[in-house]
Image (spheres, rainbow, N blue to C red):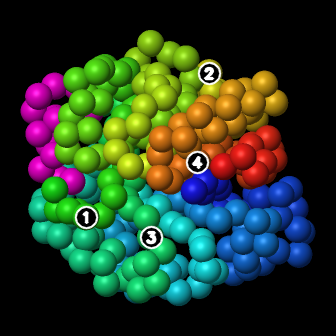
């Protein structure tokens, strides 16, 4: 099954660009749903530990067939705040997922998190608390582009995140890999000014680039149970328009 959408939907700059000018802050989710997407990646949970209520509210308001992926709190992946934080996160996820429409957790590790045996064990130790909750592992550093890393993910039943980033020596390269049941695309854009926070996600994929993604998605869908695709180039609403175009290119082939 293909689940295609964007990383987040709540952007004020989308009002009047990709959402109607009459859109209110409280109706953004409805506008997103009305466009026709069947999934969204929730990123608010990176900035603060999501409560059971927050997770439940999203679970309850989603239409039938709609799925969520939720991002791990930064206290788990970036500045570690202890195992109790992980246990609370897992508990809130399980209790809040009342309609069973959450399909797992995205663990995005920072560029400063480098490949070594110690960090492999860190990933294993932190993800083990999630047990049967699907885990999606995103690396930002190029030193994780290794066969033994993909083998590690397979052995531990973790899903590799296929990332698209600017072509820089130190950034992770896009690898078409399937390490567990699901495929996961996270498309950030290719803005060369990556280290400028204001410009990082300001990138509009052209049709030729989108055709490559569409072709790869069709290919990997033959092996994966589910394929999740999220555009994160959210500046100016590019993520939404690129997602719609990709959906059109794929058509009914998946």
Q: Residue furthest top?
A: 169
Mark 1 touches mark 4? (CB < 8 Å)? no
Secondary structure predominantly adopted by residues drawn in magenta:
helix
Mark 2 touches mark 4? (CB < 8 Å)? no
| Residue at x 36%, y 26% (from the top left corner) | 141
How many other residues sit within 10 Å of disc 3, few (<14), some (14-19) or many (≥20)?
Answer: many
Specify which label sits upstream in the sequence, 1 or 2.
1
Specify which label sits upstream in the sequence, 3 or 2.
3
Q: Nearer the viewer, mark 1 or mark 4?
A: 1
For the residues labelled 1 and 4, the Cα–Cα distance comes to 21 Å
Mark 4 — residue? Answer: 229
| Residue at x 79%, y 72% (from the top left corner) | 34
Specify which label sits upstream in the sequence, 3 or 4.
3
Spot occupied by residue 46 in the image (x, y as percentages of width and height): 40, 58
Q: Nearer the viewer, mark 3 or mark 2?
A: 3
Mark 1 touches mark 2? (CB < 8 Å)? no
Q: Nearer the viewer, mark 2 or mark 4?
A: 4
Label 3 element class: strand
Mark 3 — residue? Answer: 102
For the residues labelled 2 and 4, the Cα–Cα distance comes to 22 Å
Spot occupied by residue 60 in the image (x, y as percentages of width and height): 53, 87
168 or 187, nearer to the observer = 187
The residue segment tinted magenta is 113-127
Label 1 element class: loop
For the residues labelled 1 and 3, the Cα–Cα distance comes to 12 Å
Q: Quadrant of the N terminus?
A: bottom right
Q: Is any part of residue 189 visible from this angle?
A: no
């Amino acid at each position: 099954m293909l689940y295609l959408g964007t990383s987040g939907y709540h952007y004020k700059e989308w009002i009047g660009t990709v959402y109607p000018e009459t859109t209110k802050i409280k109706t953004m989710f409805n506008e997103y749903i009305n466009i026709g997407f069947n999934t969204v990646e929730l990123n608010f949970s990176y900035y603060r530990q999501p409560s059971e209520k927050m997770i439940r509210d999203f679970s309850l308001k989603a239409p039938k067939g709609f799925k969520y992926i939720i991002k791990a709190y930064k206290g788990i992946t970036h500045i570690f705040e202890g195992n109790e934080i992980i246990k609370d996160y897992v508990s809130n996820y399980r209790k809040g997922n009342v309609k069973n429409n959450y399909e797992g957790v995205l663990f995005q590790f920072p560029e400063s998190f480098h490949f070594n045996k110690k960090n492999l064990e860190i990933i294993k130790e932190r993800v083990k608390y999630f047990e049967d909750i699907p885990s999606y592992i995103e690396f930002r550093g190029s030193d994780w582009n290794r066969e033994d890393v993909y083998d590690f993910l397979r052995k531990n039943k973790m899903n590799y995140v296929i990332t698209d980033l600017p072509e820089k020596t130190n950034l992770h390269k896009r690898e078409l890999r399937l390490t567990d049941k699901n495929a996961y695309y996270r498309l950030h854009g290719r803005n060369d000014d990556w280290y400028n926070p204001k410009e990082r996600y300001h990138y509009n994929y052209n049709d030729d680039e989108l055709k490559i993604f569409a072709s790869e998605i069709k290919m990997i869908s033959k092996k994966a149970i589910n394929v999740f695709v999220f555009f994160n180039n959210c500046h100016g609403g590019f993520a939404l328009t690129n997602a719609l175009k990709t959906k059109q290119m794929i058509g009914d082939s998946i």
